[in-house]
Amino acid sequence: VQLQASGGGLVQAGGSLRLSCAASGRTFSSLIMGWFRQAPGKEREFVASISRSGIYTSYADSVKGRFTISRDNGKNTVDLQMNSLKPEDTAVYYCAADGRSAQIMGVGSNPDYWGQGTQVTVSS
């Protein structure tokens, strides 16, 4: 599975960004999808995940109510809409996919596949 993330950039606090991840190499609807992030000097952390059908989602507490994950199984893409961004959201964001698990991703998940990462910088 190949994952290509895009949409990162520089935004002021309170602003919005939308990340997108395009997947190829496997039937997209068979994959649980997620987003993780890694800030400088910190470990990579879970951000959000979405089930194969798109019905179920999960979010890290730090982004609940501000971020929304969605997917389009016809276009093989998963998006992360990020609103009310804060400086502490600054990180490299990674798209991830899991083809084996029965549950959507969460804290401690170890997905099978990773994208290359896209930088999000939120200025104060």
Image (cartoon, rainbow, N blue to C red):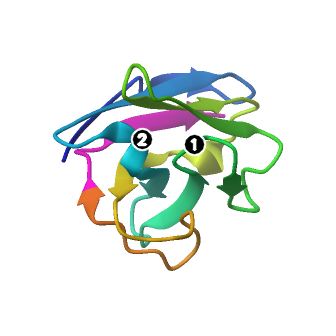
Residue that carries the numbered disc 1 in the rendered image: 53
Instruction: Farthest residue to the bottom: give it.
Output: 108
Image x and y of residue 8, in percent: 42, 28
* Magenta-span inclusion, residue 121: yes
Question: Which class describes the residues within 10 Å of circle 2: few (<14), some (14-19), or many (20+)?
Answer: some
Q: Quadrant of the C terminus?
A: top right
Magenta: main secondary structure equals strand
Q: CA–CA distance between discs 2 and 1? A: 7 Å
Relative to residue 99, is residue 1 depicted above or below?
above
Q: Is residue 30 left or right of residue 59?
A: left
Q: Which residue is mark 2?
A: 29
Q: Is residue 27 above or below residue 35?
A: above
User: What is the total number of numbered labels drawn onto the structure image?
Assistant: 2
* Residue 11 found in image quarter: top right
Nearer to me, 53 or 42? 53
For image coordinates 58% across by 69% down, the residue present is: 106
Q: Are marks 2 and 1 in contact (CB under 8 Å)?
A: yes
Q: Which segment is the magenta one?
A: 114-124
